[in-house]
Amino acid sequence: MAVIADMPDFWSNLADKIANDMPTRLPSVKSMLLNGGQIVLGAQSYFGGLDVGNAPSCANPQLSCHNQTAIEDLCCFNYPGGQMLQTQFWDTNPPTGPEDAWTIHGLWPDRCDGSYEANCDDKRAYHNIRDILESFGATDLLSNMTTYWKDYKGQDENLWMHEWAKHGTCVSTLNPSCYSSSYRPKEEVVDYFAAAVSLYQQRPTYEWLMDAGIEPSTSKSYTRAEIQDALESRHGKPVTLGCKGGKFDEVWYHFEVRGSVQTGEFVAADPDGGKSTCPYSGIRYPPKGKSVPAPTASHTRTRTHVPEPTGPPFSGTGHLKVLTQGKNNGIVIGIGEWYQQGTPAKFRATQHEDGFTLASRKGKCAVVQGMFGCGPKIKDPTVFASDGSSLSFNGSTTFYAKGEPTKWDKVVIHVDDVNGSLGTELEVEWQAA
């Protein structure tokens, strides 16, 4: 240590050189060299003295999503969930978490193409996350989660349980068989939450946006490019931006991992198939707990990652009504198009683990090439979510059309407006039959 203390310039210059060569790596090499004990001490405080040597030891691990041949050792290579998404919320109604911080949504393993596994091990779908963390002495980790890993309904532990069961059990390197003989049951639960919190701490969304002049406001609006540039310049790769009704409320940071989630290196990566759902301009970023003006016209793009439901799923049979500017303005007929008058078609909602699917007498319903439709040729129905009584697709309840139907016309319903050519925004509302 005395030698290192006498050579600060050498280590500083070396850290700068390596950090410049590898700008997208996490944690930064510079912070590791200049503050080498910081990461270890952080882990020890989270684990309450737990022997992190129980995690798999990986020699020359490969970067996930980049293998050319099959990898046998899935304790040192995350598969099939090779891309990790650290996801964050900005909940304003009700306001959730500190006013000057985004909150944690989760840590999700994707298959490198935007699809993902879910609920991979029912036997490890633990319901007592707090008790598990306390049993390992992970008091600092638990304190951090209590502040920043928040559920907008106030049911934090239910959110933790959900994220672990749905996503944590699908991380191959967290399989209990990957640990040493001194493994303690449920140790991988602590590893999962510690990794998620560590990534979150190193991706301070609120701070990065403020540094770029993007602050919560009841009057200002921002462009998608402004927000993307602010976060991409710090993360090192594009991020996925989520909006609902033109309000900015979610960010996904994408990573690939060299080695295990417990001890590996997280490397910033391009999004794996998901697309931002924020409009190109007029994005509102409201302060927590304050009202904002009604949304103006926005144009969103589709993402392929199935969203998590934001409300109770539709169930049974019902009708789909069309609303424009909050007022009833027609119905959805059996083929999935917007019609001004007539007898509403009956739709059946079937529950799915991520939401629900829809079908009419014409057939199953799906989003095909950005358009909503139902028919006998559809074999793989789309999974939808709900926000109250409104139909939600990819986190948004806003749909689009070229214009309103005339008395005898039908109009196609679109889920996105990539080119900004669709002039009418609408919502689709469920009415139980």
Image (cartoon, rainbow, N blue to C red):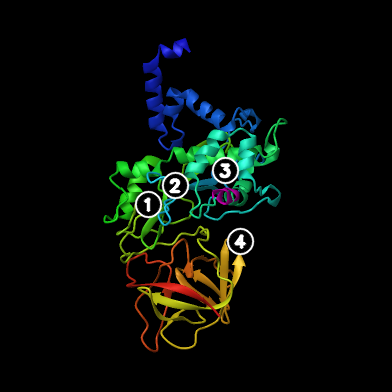
- Image quarter of residue 352: bottom right
Which segment did they paint magenta?
A: 156-161
Q: Secondary structure at mark 1?
A: loop
Who is closer to the viewer here, 1 or 89?
Answer: 89
Q: Is residue 365 left or right of residue 126?
A: left
Amino acid type for the residue under numbered disc 2: Gly
Task: Using the image, tell me which numbered label, if any, was put on residue 329.
Answer: none
N-terminal of the two: label 3 or label 2? 3
Question: Which circle marks residue 288 in the picture?
Answer: 1
User: Height in image: 178 above or below 125?
Assistant: above
Q: State the image coordinates of residue 27 (x, y, percent, origin top left).
A: 46, 33
Q: Are marks 2 and 1 in contact (CB under 8 Å)?
A: yes
Residue 157 magenta? yes
Residue located beneath label 4 in the image = 353
Q: Which residue is mark 2?
A: 97
Q: In this figure, which residue is indicated by the disc labeled 3? A: 67
Above or below, 420 against 181 in this view is below
Q: Main secondary structure of the magenta part?
A: helix
Amino acid type at circle 1 is Lys
Q: Amino acid at mark 3?
A: Asn
Q: Earlier in the sequence, mark 2 or mark 1?
A: 2
Q: Position of residue 58 (x, y in %)?
A: 61, 32
